[in-house]
Image: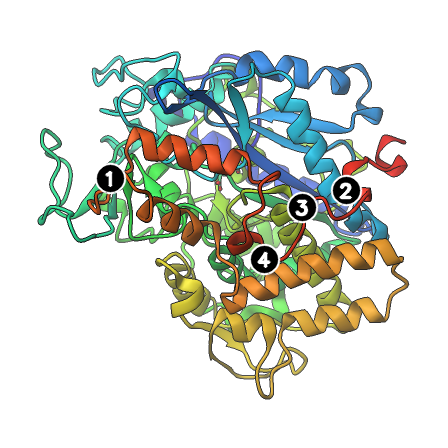
Amino acid sequence: MGLLSEGSPLSWEETKKWANHVKTNGIEQFINLYKRLKDRQGDSLKWGDEVEYLIVKFDHENKRATVSLRANEMLPILREPENQDPASAKSLWRPEYGAYMVEGTPGCPYGALPVHLNIVEANMKLRRKEAQMLLPPNEMVLSVANFPRLGCPGFTFPEYNPDTSEKGVSMSRFFPDEAIFPGHPRFATLTRNIRSRRGSKIDIQIPVFVDKNTPRPFVEAGVPEQKEDMIYLDAMGFGMGCCCLQVTFQASSIAEALKLYDNLTPLCPIMLALTAATPFYRGYISDVDCRWNIIAASVDCRRPEERSVIRKSRYDSVDTYLSEENSEYNDIPLIYEEPHYQSLITEGGIDKSLAKHIAHLFIRDPVSLFSEKINQDNKKDSDHFENIQSTNWQTMRFKPPPPESSIGWRVEFRPCEVQLTDFENAAVVCFVVLLTRVVLTYNLHFMIPISKVDENMKNAQKRNAIATEKFWFRNDLQNKTASYSLMTVNEIINGKEGFPGLITLIQNYLNSMDVDADTQCTLQQYLCLISRRAKGDVMTAAKWMREFVTSHPKYSQDSVITEEINYDLLQRIATLSENHSSTLLGNIDPNRSKTQDNVPEILTR
Ligand code: GLU
Ligand code: MG
């Protein structure tokens, strides 16, 4: 979830005093970095995925499933190979917000060879196995984007009660502080400081899915904060405790990184709709399919009077394209502190669009600061910059090279929800990677006005958006001045009269490349899944889970996911890799390719 500095965390009262110090020095650190590294060229394409997982415990006798707060004991073991020899580790493991979450990435980045696309899934399988091996027989690592009964009484193992008193970190009615990852102070500190800065508890209201027997109005006894017909959540954990799938790219130069960032930005809402996987919150069926706005509200540190001026939370979709040549599409006025912008321009010689982006990130106060990190050498360190950068969780992230490292300019693609199977996660990752190749090879332009991307983000999260919503998209990706119109996800992915569709562009690209037969076969299955999902032939995880719950014999058509339904759903998900679901995966045999079961040499090096 970002920077893991070591040391003693400061309270919001303390941090507040250093806010300007962190910001001024953070800007200076970025300027120094930029000056030192702006001409860095020739880095090779590298990329990697990040998968976040839940740890789930099954109680077969009582048909209950809970999250297991075991991440802190698993991580030191998972990280042993990396600690012993980082160069030969096959996977890297990091903590995430929940004490019931872990995050895994491949041990080393993938490169430009097509065959690398054929090892993504194998490495995901390996990671799942590595984590699974550490669990007792009744627990499982699942790539489920949100635990359906997160926040229900007794949803954790061991069981804890929430602490609503001032002593509590979240002060939540539902989410005990013990469910926050305890092994690093960042997570609790962010939780406390965001709440303190905001001046009140987190307040998330999600429309409930109204079924035949859902009480109207839908009101929860003893929860006065709940608005009518809404599912009420009151802690950072309800958002940051969700799991996503991210892809990071190293570009050959800063110019290429800006280009990738800008072109991927309009794809964020489309990929969010395609990967929708979070229809359930705190034991209820909601009327949304995606986690996005829930996480945004879960870290919303704005005070009431700031909310009309600052339009979004620290977690939200990006507000601006970065490349100067795309500035015509920046139709949302950005706010920033003029001195920050001026320094970036005059001292840094940074182009206006990028300078505005950085200055705009720096409207946020630091919400996590360690006393040991207050004084830094701005020529060498970048912790103050990273402090603000890593607590701006947006759909895309533009990442400068870290100090003293061989890593180049990078771009992170962050909207996707994690998928239930490794096959689907690999398909999504490879699809995005191939899109970046297509953008760069054919010099495509995906940009539409950024306000239209925001509109798309809103619609992408609606229930069954993939089938019912239309999204602004460019009519011609080659012509720099093309117009845009409303299209369905199916039209965007599979094309329509006069518009080729993204799959065709990728197929053309693959045809022009020397791709070995096995990789070709794997990629065709991935593209087939994406294409069929866009068409509605196979379901998103959100739709599939909704159907599972609403057709469960014990479901009372009252929007409630009972302990038993939750258990059965998670059991079904747990066996997905052996028991194929044709509505979710289509005609794809999960044991189809030999390559996918053996981690090839290339990763074991
Ligand atoms: N889990 C968060 C999400 O679902 C992202 C946290 C991170 O930045 O790694 O978007
Ligand atoms: Mg993460």
The answer to whether any part of residue 438 appears in the image is yes
Q: Are marks 1 and 2 in contact (CB under 8 Å)?
A: no
The residue to which callout 4 is attached is 586
Residue 415 is situated, as x and y percent measured from the top left of the image, at 52, 50
Q: Is residue 472 left or right of residue 245?
A: left
Secondary element at image label 3: loop
- Quadrant (top left, top right, bottom left, bottom right) of the C terminus: top right
Q: Reading the chain from its start, which is encountered first: label 1 or label 2?
A: 1
Whether the residue carrying mark 2 lies under 8 Å from ligand 2 is answered with: no
Q: Residue at x 88, y 38 (%)?
A: 602
Distance of label 4 from label 1 (alpha carbons): 29 Å
Q: Position of residue 222 (x, y in %)?
A: 10, 29
Q: Nearer the viewer, mark 3 or mark 1?
A: 3
Amino acid at circle 1: Val
Badge 1 marks a residue whose secondary structure is: loop
> Up-down: is 583 above or below 204?
below
224 sits to left or right of 544: left
Mark 4 near mark 1, Cβ–Cβ under 8 Å?
no
Residue 590 is tagged as 3
Residue occupied by mark 2: 596
The residue where tag 1 is placed is 560
Between the residue at mark 2 and the residue at mark 3, the CA separation in whole angstroms equals 9 Å
Separation of marks 3 and 4 at Cα, in angstroms: 10 Å
SS state under label 4: loop
